[in-house]
Image (cartoon, helix red, strand yellow):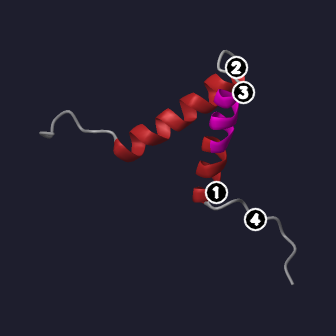
Amino acid sequence: MDNALTSPAPGDADSSLLEGLFQLAVNGQTQGWEFDQIDNEVYARLLSAYGTDSKKPA
């Protein structure tokens, strides 16, 4: 049996980021570096997944 650590599936990492962002927001901790870092990562991933190309009509 292989006991090597495996990295989390991409969906798990995305869920973890969103959960962390949500928990910080619920606790009112939106002014710190941790919130900013997670917020920037989530925003970048959303733009990557759903961003529009300005050359294509919407």
Residue 3 vertical placement versus 51 (above, below) = below
Residue of label 1: 12
Residue of label 2: 33
Sequence-first tag of 1 and 3? 1
Write the residue at 69% across / 59% down. 8
Quadrant of residue 50 in the image? top left
Write the residue at 15% across / 40% down. 56
> For the N terminus, which image quadrant?
bottom right
Query: Residue type at mark 1?
Result: Asp
Write the residue at 65% across / 20% down. 30
> Mark 1, mark 3: which one is toward the viewer?
3
Query: In what element is the residue under mark 2?
Result: helix
Residue 34 location, x and y as percent?
71, 26
Residue 6's tag is 4
Determine the CA span between mark 2 and mark 4.
28 Å
Sequence-first tag of 1 and 4? 4
Span of residues in magenta: 19-26
Predominant secondary structure in magenta?
helix
